[in-house]
């Protein structure tokens, strides 16, 4: 039996014969649940985790990729953007010449960059191995980048060691990329192609490229750039929390400020309009009662005194630095198909005490978007998380969808059905 740390294709082994034997073991596992002793422990453990998480090996679980706007935002925020020139120079150029692909993911398994042979990339689209797709182990099953992130070490996967059947023609090698100081995992570097990428030489090459990328991060940090700690830099984006809160919480430069309701509305509306708003547009978003331009200017002046000149601009009114909002996090998770993450992040409606038209519209739009995706997605965990939120407790359709998604006779389904009976009584 090959050890867990052995390469996918040990020196002297015939990759074709090994692939054939693994294909038989893969089929037997899917049919009987038995794992042959020839399957590496690393792979066997990943197969078990994937099945336990509800992944279907026949259909897979990789969702539709992120849209261009969401992908660009992830790339912009990623500290790994600074490593791409090094990765291209050391690995992508050679991989392209060899007819291979190179992928860089974030710490959650989302593919941020996919480069290399054009023909191979076109073929890979059939299994959604594209920039913006989530290739975490939980979403895509056993695969080199996803399993490397799950285990925290370099991983090689040879053909049928992939759990999802559509991915078994491919092989891959991936190594986590870590913050050079904290050693926190920032993402993974992967090379994908045929059986030729599953040997020990490929693993050594990817590890060397990762070492160079981490060295580049450290050099940037010494030069005054701090890609791994952007939240601590002066002037770095802040965080705005408005879900389920009567007033917004602004976290910036290590300090937390609870804004008054009117200032909460202004900052939230401007965070949704990065290009800025005119005075008239901002007035319309804040009140149905025609607040005067003088009143809006006074509020902006007071807000600027609270937040500082560097955050709030005028002509048009705009945030000079972007804010990461909990609203945006819910949207991003939905676009990535991470329904449970979106439902967990949605702790309540947007500024529920606000009657400002711009806030009411945002509140309704987010609730309807989330609710629609959850009901259509049929994930019982995500549905129940939303059902326990203030918006979901009396939502008959959501509870019905949760009941339908749960196994018949389970204790949780019985609880949900009892709640539906109570809702029917209350609504009748």
Image (cartoon, rainbow, N blue to C red):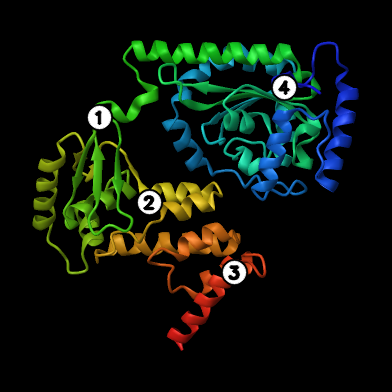
Residue that label 2 marks: 327
Badges 1 and 2: C-beta atoms under 8 Å apart? no
Q: How far apart are marks 1 and 2 (CA)?
A: 21 Å
- Side (left or right) of 90 relative to 355: right
Q: Distance between the residues labelled 1 and 3?
A: 49 Å
How many neighbours does mark 2 have within 10 angstroms: few (below 14), some (14-19), or many (20 or more)? many
- Side (left or right) of 250 relative to 117: left
In the image, residue 321 lies at what x, y percent? 28, 36
Residue at image x 69%, y 35%? Answer: 45
In the image, residue 234 lies at what x, y percent? 24, 27
When the figure is inspected, residue 401 is found, relative to residue 139, above or below; the finding is: below
Helix, strand or loop status at disc 4 = loop
Residue that label 3 marks: 413
Question: Is tag 1's residue or tag 2's residue first in the polypeptide sequence?
Answer: 1
Marker disc for residue 100: 4
Question: Which circle, 1 or 3, is nearer the viewer?
Answer: 3
Q: How far apart are marks 3 and 2 (CA)?
A: 30 Å
How many neighbours does mark 4 have within 10 angstroms: few (below 14), some (14-19), or many (20 or more)? many
Residue that label 1 marks: 235
Question: Is tag 4's residue or tag 2's residue first in the polypeptide sequence?
Answer: 4
When the figure is inspected, residue 348 is found, relative to residue 206, above or below; the finding is: below
């Amino acid at each position: 039996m090959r050890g867990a740390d052995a390469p996918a294709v040990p020196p002297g082994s015939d990759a074709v014969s090994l692939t054939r034997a693994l294909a038989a073991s893969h089929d037997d596992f899917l049919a009987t649940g038995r794992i042959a002793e020839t399957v590496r422990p690393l792979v066997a453990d990943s197969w078990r985790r994937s099945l336990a998480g509800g992944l279907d090996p026949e259909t897979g679980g990789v969702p539709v990729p992120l849209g261009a706007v969401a992908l660009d935002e992830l790339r912009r925020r990623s500290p790994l953007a600074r490593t791409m020139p090094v990765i291209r120079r050391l690995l992508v150029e050679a991989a392209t010449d060899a007819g291979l692909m190179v992928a860089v993911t974030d710490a959650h398994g989302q593919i941020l960059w996919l480069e290399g042979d054009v023909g191979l990339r076109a073929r890979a689209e059939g299994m959604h191995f594209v920039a913006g797709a989530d290739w975490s182990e939980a979403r895509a099953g056993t695969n080199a980048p996803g399993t490397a992130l799950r285990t925290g070490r370099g991983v090689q996967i040879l053909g049928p060691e992939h759990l999802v059947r559509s991915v078994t023609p491919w092989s891959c090698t991936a190594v986590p990329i870590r913050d050079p100081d904290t050693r926190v995992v920032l993402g993974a570097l992967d090379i994908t192609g045929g059986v030729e990428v599953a040997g020990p030489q490929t693993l050594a090459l990817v590890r060397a490229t990762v070492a160079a990328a981490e060295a580049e991060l450290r050099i940037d940090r010494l030069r005054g750039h701090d890609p791994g700690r952007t939240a601590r830099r002066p002037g770095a984006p802040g965080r705005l929390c408005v879900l389920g809160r009567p007033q917004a919480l602004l976290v910036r430069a290590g300090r937390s400020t609870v804004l008054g309701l009117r200032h909460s509305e202004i900052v939230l509306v401007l965070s949704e309009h990065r290009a800025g708003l005119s005075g008239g547009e901002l007035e319309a978003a804040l009140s149905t009662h025609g607040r005067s331009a003088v009143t809006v200017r006074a509020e902006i002046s007071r807000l600027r005194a609270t937040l500082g000149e560097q955050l709030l601009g005028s002509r048009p009114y705009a945030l000079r630095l972007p804010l990461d909002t909990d609203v945006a996090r819910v949207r991003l998770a939905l676009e990535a198909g991470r329904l449970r993450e979106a439902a967990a992040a949605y702790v309540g409606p947007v500024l529920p005490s606000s009657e400002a038209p711009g806030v009411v519209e945002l509140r309704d739009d987010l609730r309807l978007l989330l609710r629609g995706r959850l009901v259509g997605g049929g994930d019982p965990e995500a549905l129940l998380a939303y059902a326990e939120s203030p918006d979901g407790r009396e939502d008959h359709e959501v509870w019905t969808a949760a009941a339908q998604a749960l196994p018949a006779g389970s204790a949780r389904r019985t609880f949900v059905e009892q709640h539906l009976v109570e809702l029917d009584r209350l609504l009748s």
